[in-house]
Amino acid sequence: MDKQFEAVSAAFSRKAGVYDAFGEGHQNLTRMRRKVYDHIGGLVLPGGYLLELNAGTGLDAAEMARRGYWVHATDLSPEMVAQIERKIEAGGLHGRLAAQQCSFTDLEQVTAGPFDAIYSNSGGLNCIDDLTAVTRQLPRLLKPGGIVTWVIMPRICPWELALTFKDWRVGTRRLRPGGVLAHVEGVRFQTWYFTARQARRAFGPGFRQVKLEGLSVITPTADNKTFAANHPRLYRQLARGDDWLSRRRPFNGWGDFFILSMQAVG
Ligand SMILES: C[S@@+](CC[C@H](N)C(=O)[O-])C[C@H]1O[C@@H](n2cnc3c(N)ncnc32)[C@H](O)[C@@H]1O
């Protein structure tokens, strides 16, 4: 494992035990996750077989399993994978949800499949600088016409840009060339931001775009747990505006994340 992956794995293994608690009572993050489920649900019917990349503690994997999908969840961090295994036990999800420690750059280790869809949520893919290291492995794992849904942090995040006057570094961090050093649980590792166009191009001619939407274009970023609770009326108004904007250009490639779905063709 190279130094970057070692650092990422160590950081998220330290985070694993407290990761889910941050999402409890987090109205904004709940809305963001629901949007991802609705996006995938609009493209893949329940009963489909899903491969999740960078699944973290398995929050989404367990939810998709409860929604009637079959899920193979993978993550680099052993402690994150242990959390998924706990959810399988606690939720009686044996057979419906499986966990495997695996980097999304080493998907030849995945012997399950073929899958109706492969998804990655919450910017795990922002931990690498070359998305083709992942895309080139996908055709082997997908059924013909299969879907890939990636939730990636773009360079333009209006909410963060609006904060530039408060904190110049945070406001402009995504625009810096060469990525940004992230600090998670005392561990530092590099992260990179991508435009939707860069992400789309990484797939090459064997895929076509089927859907692109912005995720939290004018609503707060996922790390903001307090805004929705402290300003409920304003948050509701922003969320309505966000619903409208997020499907329209250029906002569909902006936000805390964008959700890009590609389909295997030919
Ligand atoms: C921000 S968390 C997101 C977890 C989950 N997808 C969610 O929505 O809660 C990022 C995850 O990406 C995983 N990750 C980072 N680099 C990875 C890699 N090369 N292969 C697999 N997982 C990776 C980390 O271990 C971490 O669990």
Image (cartoon, grey):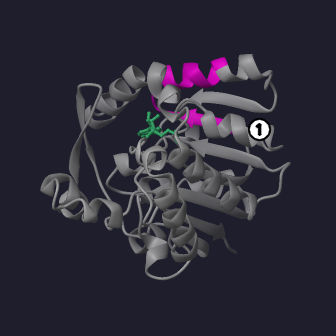
* On screen, residue 113 above or below 216: above
- Ligand 1: does it lie within 8 Å of the C-beta at label 1? no
* On screen, residue 90 above or below 120: above
Q: How far across and how far down the image is residue 52, in percent?
A: 61, 43
SS for dot 1: helix
Q: Is residue 211 left or right of residue 44?
A: left
Q: Quarter of the image holding residue 124? A: top left
How crowded is the residue under tag 1: few (<14 C-alpha within 10 Å), some, or many (20+)? many
Quadrant of the drawing holding the C terminus: bottom right
Q: Is residue 206 visible?
A: no
Task: Give the prevailing secondary structure in the magenta stretch.
Answer: helix
* On screen, residue 251 above or below 218: below
Q: Quarter of the image holding residue 263? A: bottom right
Instruction: Give the residues in magenta.
Output: 72-86
Quadrant of the drawing holding the N terminus: top left
Q: How far across and how far down the image is residue 118, in percent?
A: 64, 52
Which residue is nearer to you in this view: 264 or 82? 82
Which residue is nearer to you in this view: 245 or 172? 245
Tell me if residue 121 is in the magenta stretch.
no
Q: Residue under circle 1?
A: 65
Q: Is residue 55 visible?
A: yes
The amino acid sitting under disc 1 is: Ala
Q: Residue at x 68, y 73 (%)?
A: 265
Q: How far across and how far down the image is residue 113, in percent?
A: 73, 44
